[in-house]
Amino acid sequence: MNSAIAALVGLALAIILIIKKVPPVFSLLLGALAGGLLAGWGIEATVAHMVSGVKDIVPAIVRIIAAGVLSGMLIVTGAADSIAVAIVDKLGAGRVYLALALAAMLLTATGVFIDVAVITIAPIALMVGSQSGAPLPKLLLAMIGGGKCGNIISPNPNTIIAAENFGAPLQGVMLANLIPALIGLAVTVWVIVPLMPGGNSLAAKASASTAAPSRRKDLPSFWASVAGPLLAVALLALRPLFGIAIDPLVALPAGGLFGLLTTRRWSLALESLRCGLEKMAPVAVLLVGTGTIAGIIKASAITSIVVDMLSGWGGGELLAAISGALMCAATASTTAGATVASASFSGAILASGVKAVSGAAIVNASATVLDHLPHGTFFHATGGCAGLSVSERMKLIPFESLTGLTLAATSVLVQILL
Protein backbone atom coordinates (compact mmCIF):
# COMPACT_ATOMS: atom_id res chain seq x y z
CA MET A 1 0.00 0.00 0.00
CA ASN A 2 1.19 3.52 -0.77
CA SER A 3 2.77 5.02 2.35
CA ALA A 4 0.57 8.14 2.20
CA ILE A 5 -2.63 6.10 2.05
CA ALA A 6 -1.35 3.80 4.77
CA ALA A 7 -0.58 6.73 7.07
CA LEU A 8 -4.04 8.19 6.46
CA VAL A 9 -5.63 4.82 7.24
CA GLY A 10 -3.64 4.70 10.47
CA LEU A 11 -4.77 8.22 11.37
CA ALA A 12 -8.38 7.31 10.56
CA LEU A 13 -8.11 4.24 12.79
CA ALA A 14 -6.83 6.43 15.63
CA ILE A 15 -9.78 8.80 15.19
CA ILE A 16 -12.28 5.93 15.21
CA LEU A 17 -10.74 4.51 18.38
CA ILE A 18 -10.86 7.93 20.06
CA ILE A 19 -14.53 8.26 19.14
CA LYS A 20 -15.06 4.80 20.63
CA LYS A 21 -13.67 6.15 23.92
CA VAL A 22 -10.35 4.31 23.74
CA PRO A 23 -7.77 6.49 25.58
CA PRO A 24 -6.28 8.86 22.98
CA VAL A 25 -2.66 7.90 23.61
CA PHE A 26 -3.39 4.21 22.93
CA SER A 27 -5.54 5.14 19.92
CA LEU A 28 -2.68 7.13 18.44
CA LEU A 29 -0.13 4.39 19.18
CA LEU A 30 -2.28 1.75 17.49
CA GLY A 31 -2.99 4.06 14.56
CA ALA A 32 0.71 4.77 14.10
CA LEU A 33 1.59 1.07 14.27
CA ALA A 34 -1.14 0.14 11.79
CA GLY A 35 -0.07 2.91 9.40
CA GLY A 36 3.54 1.75 9.35
CA LEU A 37 2.68 -1.90 8.90
CA LEU A 38 0.20 -1.14 6.10
CA ALA A 39 2.92 0.89 4.39
CA GLY A 40 4.99 -2.31 4.27
CA TRP A 41 7.79 -1.03 6.49
CA GLY A 42 7.74 -3.99 8.85
CA ILE A 43 7.66 -3.90 12.64
CA GLU A 44 11.27 -2.80 13.18
CA ALA A 45 11.16 0.16 10.77
CA THR A 46 7.67 1.17 11.90
CA VAL A 47 8.72 1.28 15.55
CA ALA A 48 11.85 3.21 14.58
CA HIS A 49 9.73 5.89 12.86
CA MET A 50 7.37 6.03 15.84
CA VAL A 51 10.24 6.46 18.29
CA SER A 52 11.85 9.07 16.04
CA GLY A 53 8.63 11.06 16.14
CA VAL A 54 8.58 10.97 19.92
CA LYS A 55 12.25 11.98 20.15
CA ASP A 56 11.51 15.09 18.10
CA ILE A 57 9.08 16.42 20.69
CA VAL A 58 10.83 15.38 23.93
CA PRO A 59 12.36 18.87 24.46
CA ALA A 60 8.91 20.41 24.18
CA ILE A 61 7.46 17.87 26.62
CA VAL A 62 10.07 18.85 29.21
CA ARG A 63 9.20 22.53 28.80
CA ILE A 64 5.48 21.77 29.01
CA ILE A 65 5.96 19.95 32.32
CA ALA A 66 7.95 22.93 33.61
CA ALA A 67 5.10 25.23 32.58
CA GLY A 68 2.96 23.39 35.11
CA VAL A 69 4.53 25.49 37.87
CA LEU A 70 2.95 28.64 36.43
CA SER A 71 -0.36 26.98 35.61
CA GLY A 72 -0.64 25.35 39.03
CA MET A 73 0.09 28.64 40.79
CA LEU A 74 -2.66 30.46 38.87
CA ILE A 75 -5.23 27.80 39.78
CA VAL A 76 -4.36 26.98 43.39
CA THR A 77 -3.69 30.50 44.68
CA GLY A 78 -6.93 31.85 43.25
CA ALA A 79 -5.03 34.11 40.85
CA ALA A 80 -7.05 32.84 37.89
CA ASP A 81 -10.31 33.52 39.72
CA SER A 82 -9.08 36.98 40.72
CA ILE A 83 -8.24 37.91 37.14
CA ALA A 84 -11.63 36.74 35.88
CA VAL A 85 -13.60 38.45 38.65
CA ALA A 86 -11.72 41.73 38.21
CA ILE A 87 -12.44 41.90 34.47
CA VAL A 88 -16.11 40.96 34.78
CA ASP A 89 -16.67 43.37 37.67
CA LYS A 90 -14.92 46.19 35.82
CA LEU A 91 -16.92 45.81 32.60
CA GLY A 92 -20.19 44.94 34.30
CA ALA A 93 -23.26 42.97 33.25
CA GLY A 94 -23.98 45.40 30.42
CA ARG A 95 -20.92 44.15 28.57
CA VAL A 96 -21.22 40.55 29.68
CA TYR A 97 -20.02 38.95 26.43
CA LEU A 98 -16.99 41.22 26.15
CA ALA A 99 -16.18 40.69 29.83
CA LEU A 100 -16.33 36.90 29.61
CA ALA A 101 -14.41 36.72 26.34
CA LEU A 102 -11.72 39.08 27.63
CA ALA A 103 -11.43 37.18 30.91
CA ALA A 104 -11.02 33.87 29.09
CA MET A 105 -8.51 35.41 26.70
CA LEU A 106 -6.39 36.84 29.51
CA LEU A 107 -6.46 33.62 31.52
CA THR A 108 -5.35 31.44 28.61
CA ALA A 109 -2.79 34.07 27.58
CA THR A 110 -1.19 33.83 31.03
CA GLY A 111 -0.80 30.06 30.72
CA VAL A 112 -4.05 28.53 31.95
CA PHE A 113 -5.43 25.69 29.80
CA ILE A 114 -8.43 26.85 27.77
CA ASP A 115 -10.79 24.26 29.28
CA VAL A 116 -9.62 25.19 32.79
CA ALA A 117 -10.10 28.87 31.95
CA VAL A 118 -13.69 28.28 30.81
CA ILE A 119 -14.46 26.13 33.85
CA THR A 120 -12.97 28.82 36.11
CA ILE A 121 -15.07 31.59 34.60
CA ALA A 122 -18.28 29.56 34.23
CA PRO A 123 -19.63 30.23 37.76
CA ILE A 124 -19.06 33.96 37.27
CA ALA A 125 -20.75 33.77 33.87
CA LEU A 126 -23.76 32.03 35.38
CA MET A 127 -24.05 34.66 38.08
CA VAL A 128 -23.72 37.66 35.76
CA GLY A 129 -25.88 36.01 33.11
CA SER A 130 -28.68 35.37 35.59
CA GLN A 131 -28.77 39.11 36.29
CA SER A 132 -28.86 40.08 32.62
CA GLY A 133 -30.97 37.18 31.31
CA ALA A 134 -28.29 36.34 28.72
CA PRO A 135 -28.67 32.96 26.94
CA LEU A 136 -26.39 30.20 28.23
CA PRO A 137 -25.08 29.12 24.81
CA LYS A 138 -24.02 32.67 23.99
CA LEU A 139 -22.24 33.02 27.33
CA LEU A 140 -20.33 29.81 26.68
CA LEU A 141 -19.54 30.82 23.10
CA ALA A 142 -18.07 34.12 24.32
CA MET A 143 -15.84 32.29 26.82
CA ILE A 144 -14.69 29.71 24.27
CA GLY A 145 -14.02 32.34 21.62
CA GLY A 146 -12.00 34.44 24.04
CA GLY A 147 -10.12 31.36 25.20
CA LYS A 148 -9.16 30.47 21.64
CA CYS A 149 -7.82 34.00 21.13
CA GLY A 150 -5.71 33.83 24.26
CA ASN A 151 -4.50 30.32 23.50
CA ILE A 152 -2.58 31.39 20.39
CA ILE A 153 -0.55 34.00 22.32
CA SER A 154 0.06 31.93 25.44
CA PRO A 155 2.89 29.83 26.86
CA ASN A 156 0.53 26.86 26.71
CA PRO A 157 1.55 23.43 25.36
CA ASN A 158 0.25 24.11 21.83
CA THR A 159 2.42 27.22 21.46
CA ILE A 160 5.45 25.59 23.05
CA ILE A 161 5.26 22.53 20.80
CA ALA A 162 4.77 24.58 17.62
CA ALA A 163 7.71 26.84 18.48
CA GLU A 164 9.90 23.85 19.33
CA ASN A 165 9.15 21.92 16.14
CA PHE A 166 9.85 24.96 13.97
CA GLY A 167 12.95 25.93 15.94
CA ALA A 168 11.43 29.35 16.69
CA PRO A 169 11.67 31.34 19.93
CA LEU A 170 8.56 30.93 22.06
CA GLN A 171 8.15 34.65 22.70
CA GLY A 172 8.33 35.32 18.95
CA VAL A 173 5.53 32.86 18.21
CA MET A 174 3.40 34.34 21.00
CA LEU A 175 3.89 37.89 19.74
CA ALA A 176 3.31 36.96 16.09
CA ASN A 177 -0.33 36.11 16.79
CA LEU A 178 -1.14 39.14 18.95
CA ILE A 179 -2.92 41.05 16.16
CA PRO A 180 -4.94 37.98 15.04
CA ALA A 181 -5.91 37.37 18.68
CA LEU A 182 -7.21 40.91 19.13
CA ILE A 183 -9.08 40.77 15.82
CA GLY A 184 -10.49 37.37 16.77
CA LEU A 185 -11.70 38.77 20.11
CA ALA A 186 -13.50 41.66 18.41
CA VAL A 187 -15.08 39.42 15.76
CA THR A 188 -16.20 36.90 18.39
CA VAL A 189 -17.86 39.48 20.64
CA TRP A 190 -19.42 41.80 18.05
CA VAL A 191 -20.05 39.49 15.08
CA ILE A 192 -20.10 35.77 15.94
CA VAL A 193 -21.93 35.86 19.29
CA PRO A 194 -24.72 38.10 17.89
CA LEU A 195 -25.06 35.75 14.90
CA MET A 196 -25.90 32.81 17.16
CA PRO A 197 -29.62 32.28 17.88
CA GLY A 198 -30.49 33.22 21.45
CA GLY A 199 -32.09 30.07 22.74
CA ASN A 200 -33.25 29.89 26.35
CA SER A 201 -32.24 32.70 28.65
CA LEU A 202 -30.13 31.87 31.65
CA ALA A 203 -32.62 33.47 33.99
CA ALA A 204 -35.32 31.09 32.79
CA LYS A 205 -33.16 27.98 32.70
CA ALA A 206 -30.68 28.13 35.54
CA SER A 207 -31.60 27.02 39.01
CA ALA A 208 -30.95 29.30 41.93
CA SER A 209 -28.03 27.21 43.05
CA THR A 210 -26.23 27.41 39.72
CA ALA A 211 -27.24 30.92 38.79
CA ALA A 212 -25.75 32.56 41.85
CA PRO A 213 -22.62 30.65 42.89
CA SER A 214 -20.65 31.95 45.81
CA ARG A 215 -17.33 33.68 45.22
CA ARG A 216 -14.15 32.95 47.06
CA LYS A 217 -13.53 35.54 49.73
CA ASP A 218 -9.75 35.18 49.97
CA LEU A 219 -8.72 36.02 46.41
CA PRO A 220 -5.43 37.87 45.87
CA SER A 221 -5.46 41.26 44.19
CA PHE A 222 -5.53 41.55 40.41
CA TRP A 223 -1.99 42.92 40.15
CA ALA A 224 -0.60 40.31 42.51
CA SER A 225 -2.31 37.67 40.37
CA VAL A 226 -0.87 38.83 37.05
CA ALA A 227 2.63 39.54 38.40
CA GLY A 228 3.82 35.96 37.89
CA PRO A 229 2.74 35.64 34.25
CA LEU A 230 4.11 39.13 33.55
CA LEU A 231 7.51 38.12 34.91
CA ALA A 232 7.53 35.01 32.71
CA VAL A 233 6.73 37.12 29.64
CA ALA A 234 9.37 39.70 30.62
CA LEU A 235 12.04 36.98 30.94
CA LEU A 236 11.10 35.57 27.53
CA ALA A 237 11.24 39.09 26.06
CA LEU A 238 14.87 39.55 27.11
CA ARG A 239 16.02 37.61 24.05
CA PRO A 240 14.52 39.83 21.32
CA LEU A 241 15.09 43.03 23.33
CA PHE A 242 18.59 42.55 24.71
CA GLY A 243 19.90 39.30 23.24
CA ILE A 244 19.68 37.50 26.61
CA ALA A 245 18.18 34.07 26.04
CA ILE A 246 16.08 32.77 28.94
CA ASP A 247 14.64 29.39 28.04
CA PRO A 248 10.94 28.74 28.78
CA LEU A 249 12.17 25.88 30.94
CA VAL A 250 13.40 28.59 33.33
CA ALA A 251 11.10 31.54 32.58
CA LEU A 252 7.76 29.78 33.10
CA PRO A 253 8.57 28.15 36.48
CA ALA A 254 10.15 31.45 37.59
CA GLY A 255 6.87 33.20 36.85
CA GLY A 256 5.00 30.60 38.87
CA LEU A 257 7.28 30.91 41.89
CA PHE A 258 7.16 34.71 41.73
CA GLY A 259 3.37 34.51 41.62
CA LEU A 260 3.40 32.54 44.87
CA LEU A 261 5.32 35.40 46.47
CA THR A 262 3.21 38.25 45.09
CA THR A 263 -0.05 36.53 46.03
CA ARG A 264 1.39 35.71 49.48
CA ARG A 265 0.47 32.07 49.01
CA TRP A 266 3.91 30.51 49.49
CA SER A 267 2.35 27.95 51.85
CA LEU A 268 0.52 26.60 48.79
CA ALA A 269 3.74 25.96 46.87
CA LEU A 270 3.62 22.17 47.09
CA GLU A 271 -0.07 22.07 46.29
CA SER A 272 0.55 24.32 43.28
CA LEU A 273 3.32 22.05 42.04
CA ARG A 274 1.12 18.99 42.41
CA CYS A 275 -1.77 20.70 40.64
CA GLY A 276 0.47 21.84 37.80
CA LEU A 277 1.91 18.38 37.35
CA GLU A 278 -1.58 16.86 37.36
CA LYS A 279 -2.63 19.25 34.61
CA MET A 280 0.48 18.75 32.47
CA ALA A 281 1.00 15.00 32.90
CA PRO A 282 -1.96 13.98 30.69
CA VAL A 283 -0.77 16.43 28.03
CA ALA A 284 2.75 15.01 28.16
CA VAL A 285 1.43 11.46 27.81
CA LEU A 286 -0.85 12.50 24.95
CA LEU A 287 2.12 14.07 23.17
CA VAL A 288 3.91 10.72 23.23
CA GLY A 289 1.01 9.28 21.23
CA THR A 290 0.89 12.24 18.86
CA GLY A 291 4.64 11.95 18.40
CA THR A 292 4.31 8.39 17.15
CA ILE A 293 1.64 9.22 14.57
CA ALA A 294 3.62 12.32 13.56
CA GLY A 295 6.66 10.12 12.99
CA ILE A 296 4.66 7.86 10.67
CA ILE A 297 3.16 10.80 8.76
CA LYS A 298 6.56 12.46 8.43
CA ALA A 299 8.12 9.26 7.07
CA SER A 300 5.29 8.74 4.56
CA ALA A 301 4.73 10.46 1.25
CA ILE A 302 1.90 12.63 2.62
CA THR A 303 4.02 15.73 2.99
CA SER A 304 5.30 15.71 -0.58
CA ILE A 305 1.83 14.95 -1.97
CA VAL A 306 0.22 17.81 -0.05
CA VAL A 307 3.02 20.19 -1.06
CA ASP A 308 2.54 19.26 -4.72
CA MET A 309 -1.23 19.73 -4.45
CA LEU A 310 -0.85 23.18 -2.90
CA SER A 311 1.89 24.42 -5.19
CA GLY A 312 0.77 27.67 -6.75
CA TRP A 313 -2.04 28.10 -4.22
CA GLY A 314 -0.23 30.23 -1.68
CA GLY A 315 2.89 28.36 -0.72
CA GLY A 316 4.00 27.47 2.76
CA GLU A 317 1.54 29.74 4.57
CA LEU A 318 -1.41 27.85 3.11
CA LEU A 319 0.25 24.52 3.91
CA ALA A 320 0.73 25.63 7.51
CA ALA A 321 -2.91 26.71 7.81
CA ILE A 322 -4.39 23.59 6.22
CA SER A 323 -2.16 21.18 8.13
CA GLY A 324 -3.01 22.82 11.45
CA ALA A 325 -6.74 22.81 10.75
CA LEU A 326 -6.84 19.21 9.51
CA MET A 327 -4.74 17.79 12.33
CA CYS A 328 -6.75 19.55 15.04
CA ALA A 329 -9.92 18.19 13.44
CA ALA A 330 -8.46 14.70 13.46
CA THR A 331 -7.43 14.85 17.11
CA ALA A 332 -10.06 17.32 18.44
CA SER A 333 -7.25 18.99 20.35
CA THR A 334 -5.28 22.18 19.82
CA THR A 335 -2.18 20.69 21.41
CA ALA A 336 -2.31 17.39 19.55
CA GLY A 337 -3.20 19.12 16.29
CA ALA A 338 -0.35 21.61 16.60
CA THR A 339 1.99 18.75 17.48
CA VAL A 340 1.19 16.51 14.53
CA ALA A 341 1.02 19.40 12.04
CA SER A 342 4.25 21.08 13.11
CA ALA A 343 6.17 17.82 13.48
CA SER A 344 5.01 16.46 10.13
CA PHE A 345 5.01 19.56 7.92
CA SER A 346 7.51 22.00 9.46
CA GLY A 347 10.28 20.87 7.12
CA ALA A 348 8.19 21.43 4.00
CA ILE A 349 6.84 24.75 5.31
CA LEU A 350 10.32 26.05 6.09
CA ALA A 351 11.63 24.80 2.74
CA SER A 352 9.01 26.90 0.98
CA GLY A 353 10.61 30.04 2.38
CA VAL A 354 8.29 30.70 5.31
CA LYS A 355 10.08 31.97 8.41
CA ALA A 356 10.13 29.71 11.45
CA VAL A 357 8.16 32.13 13.62
CA SER A 358 5.54 32.64 10.90
CA GLY A 359 5.10 28.93 10.26
CA ALA A 360 4.73 28.13 13.95
CA ALA A 361 2.29 31.00 14.48
CA ILE A 362 0.05 29.98 11.57
CA VAL A 363 -0.01 26.31 12.58
CA ASN A 364 -0.82 27.32 16.16
CA ALA A 365 -3.66 29.62 15.10
CA SER A 366 -5.06 27.09 12.63
CA ALA A 367 -5.10 24.39 15.31
CA THR A 368 -8.07 26.23 16.86
CA VAL A 369 -10.36 25.84 13.84
CA LEU A 370 -11.85 22.44 14.73
CA ASP A 371 -10.37 21.52 18.09
CA HIS A 372 -13.84 21.53 19.66
CA LEU A 373 -15.30 18.49 17.85
CA PRO A 374 -17.23 15.93 19.94
CA HIS A 375 -14.55 13.23 19.93
CA GLY A 376 -12.34 15.45 22.09
CA THR A 377 -12.50 16.25 25.81
CA PHE A 378 -12.82 20.02 25.31
CA PHE A 379 -16.31 19.65 23.83
CA HIS A 380 -17.60 17.77 26.87
CA ALA A 381 -15.72 19.71 29.55
CA THR A 382 -16.98 23.09 28.36
CA GLY A 383 -20.54 21.90 27.79
CA GLY A 384 -20.65 20.30 31.22
CA CYS A 385 -19.48 23.36 33.13
CA ALA A 386 -22.30 25.42 31.58
CA GLY A 387 -24.93 22.73 32.08
CA LEU A 388 -25.63 22.26 28.36
CA SER A 389 -26.86 18.98 26.91
CA VAL A 390 -24.89 17.34 24.09
CA SER A 391 -27.41 18.55 21.50
CA GLU A 392 -27.21 22.10 22.84
CA ARG A 393 -23.43 21.95 22.89
CA MET A 394 -23.38 20.71 19.28
CA LYS A 395 -25.11 23.91 18.14
CA LEU A 396 -22.05 25.94 19.17
CA ILE A 397 -19.68 24.11 16.80
CA PRO A 398 -20.27 26.22 13.64
CA PHE A 399 -19.80 29.45 15.58
CA GLU A 400 -16.69 28.22 17.40
CA SER A 401 -15.30 27.26 14.02
CA LEU A 402 -15.88 30.80 12.77
CA THR A 403 -13.66 32.11 15.55
CA GLY A 404 -11.00 29.56 14.66
CA LEU A 405 -11.23 30.43 10.97
CA THR A 406 -10.90 34.12 11.83
CA LEU A 407 -7.74 33.43 13.82
CA ALA A 408 -6.25 31.22 11.10
CA ALA A 409 -7.06 33.62 8.25
CA THR A 410 -5.79 36.71 10.04
CA SER A 411 -2.64 34.87 11.14
CA VAL A 412 -1.89 33.94 7.53
CA LEU A 413 -2.59 37.49 6.35
CA VAL A 414 -0.49 39.12 9.07
CA GLN A 415 2.47 36.83 8.46
CA ILE A 416 2.33 37.44 4.69
CA LEU A 417 2.11 41.21 5.13
CA LEU A 418 4.81 41.32 7.78
Image: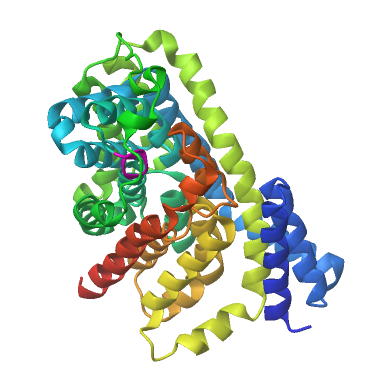
> Residue at left 27%, top 69%?
415
- Residue 314's place in the image compared with 194, above or below, is below
**Residue 336 in the image, given as x and y percentages of width and height:** 55, 54
Residue 33 picture quarter: bottom right
Q: 61 or 364, which is in the foreground? A: 364
Q: Is residue 291 left or right of residue 391?
A: right
Q: Quadrant of the C terminus?
A: bottom left
> Residue at left 31%, top 37%?
201
Task: Work out which residue is located at the far bottom of the displayed protein and give it.
Answer: 312
**In this figure, which colouring scheme has been used for the structure?**
rainbow
**Residue 106 in the image, given as x and y percentages of width and height:** 27, 38
- Residue 226's place in the image compared with 160, above or below, is above
> Residue at left 35%, top 52%?
152
Taking the image as drawn, is residue 98 in sight? yes
- Residue 403's place in the image compared with 138, above or below, is below
- Residue 74's place in the image compared with 328, above or below, is above
> Residue at left 53%, top 62%?
329
Q: Is residue 360 left or right of residue 326?
A: left
Q: Is residue 32 left or right of residue 297?
A: right
**Residue 54 in the image, given as x and y percentages of width and height:** 65, 55
Q: Which residues are magenta?
A: 135-139
Q: Is residue 85 magenta?
A: no
Q: Quadrant of the N terminus?
A: bottom right
Taking the image as drawn, is residue 258 in sight? no
Q: 242 or 302, which is in the foreground? A: 302
Query: What is the chief secondary structure element of the magenta stretch?
Result: helix
